[in-house]
Amino acid sequence: MIDRNHNDVLEYHKMRPIMLRYLDNHCEELPPDHKLPDGKTALIIRWGAIGDMIFTSPLPRLLKEQGYYVVVNTQRQGLSVLQENPYVDEFWFQERGTIDQVKMHLYIEKLKEGFDKVVDLTQSIEREILHLPDDTGFKMVDDRNVNYIDHTISKSGLDVTGLNGELYFTEAEEKAAQDFLSDFQDKFVVLVCLLGSSIHKAYPWWQFIFNDTTLYKEIPELITITTGDEWARLLDWEHPNNVQGAASLPLRKSLLLAKHVDLVVGPETGILNGAGCFDTPKICLLTHSHKDNLCKYWKNDYSIQSPADCSPCHEMVYSRDQCQIDKHTQTSKCISQITPDMVIKQIKAAYKEWKRKKFRAIITPSQYHEDRKSCQPLVIL
């Protein structure tokens, strides 16, 4: 069952094929069966990756609260992130690469026709906060440490700040996640995002952190679940307390696990952005972004800014040539300088808080006060 409260109507999203195509020098008209309804209508255009879509995720609710019928034009990753958002009335979907880059602006102008409000987020972060290689044709914002979600919402003309992302799941998805975690009750479960989309998101020290001489030894309750794409399997490790999920855990399941585990750790990836939607403790290994860009409003945040002198660079990194490379790890200097000891320290801090909450949940208030009388001082780990 999907909870859709807006307009007091329960309805499923309409999964659409490409709604508009560019043909020669003219755009097609909107097909008759896709005419917009009466009343205020709003269009959100965002073709970004997972993190970009999480930055966009509060917008449908904010526009719905203003009385708009909300349409989102996005691509496959956008659907994965927003597909159960109850504040989206329609998706206008297209596969990546189907629009000619040269003619994209004409396509977008045609797409906007008939809407009362249009929020065009095309390259709104990539060209305004993060610098694209060899690109001088854009204007940077004055404060490049601005929070990504604050900046995204500001593009809609709304004066709203301080929000985190919003992810929605069905009851079936929730049950599947709980079943997956049922074997790990009373364990300290850590979701480890092994790898991101760029070289500065390839953390080289995982197996120095998670082994029998470090955390598995020092935290006996520790269970790790790894996640990532096919390439992430190269960074995975075998251990009785490690569930190897790289290349096997679907995106939405990983995002949902980020809600229910005890800690999420990893570089600047979509999963870490997803964890920012929830109260789950998280450790983001920050490289090209400033802590305020991503984590300013996160709850239970233990994130680490790289100590490298180049971090944050606010660069979109597509190749090794754009980064200073660490000669020992052959990955970016910024991610390499986040040492295992720095990450271990933060994991232990999150574990200590987990133990404290677990201890307080076991002892009733009356027992707690009785113990304080008979056993001073009582140390809570």
Image (cartoon, rainbow, N blue to C red):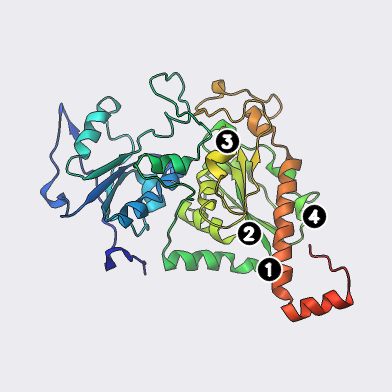
The residue where tag 1 is placed is 186
Amino acid under label 4?
Answer: Lys
Disc nearest the viewer among 1 and 4: 1
Q: Secondary structure at mark 2?
A: loop
Residue 324 vertical position relative to residue 45 in the rendered view, above or below:
above
- The answer to whether residue 45 is left or right of residue 291 is left
The residue where tag 2 is placed is 262
The residue where tag 4 is placed is 217
Mark found first going from the N terminus, 3 or 1: 1
Which residue is at the front of the view, 183 or 5?
A: 5
The reply to whether discs 4 and 2 touch (Cβ–Cβ < 8 Å) is no
Q: Secondary structure at mark 3?
A: loop
Q: Residues within 10 Å of mark 3 (few under 14, many from 20)?
A: many
Q: Residues within 10 Å of mark 1 (few under 14, many from 20)?
A: few
Amino acid under label 2?
Answer: Asp
Q: Secondary structure at mark 4?
A: helix
Residue 243 in view in this figure? no
Q: Residues within 10 Å of mark 2 (few under 14, many from 20)?
A: many
Give the CA separation, mark 3 to mark 1.
35 Å
Q: In which quadrant of the rendered view does residue 373 lie?
A: bottom right
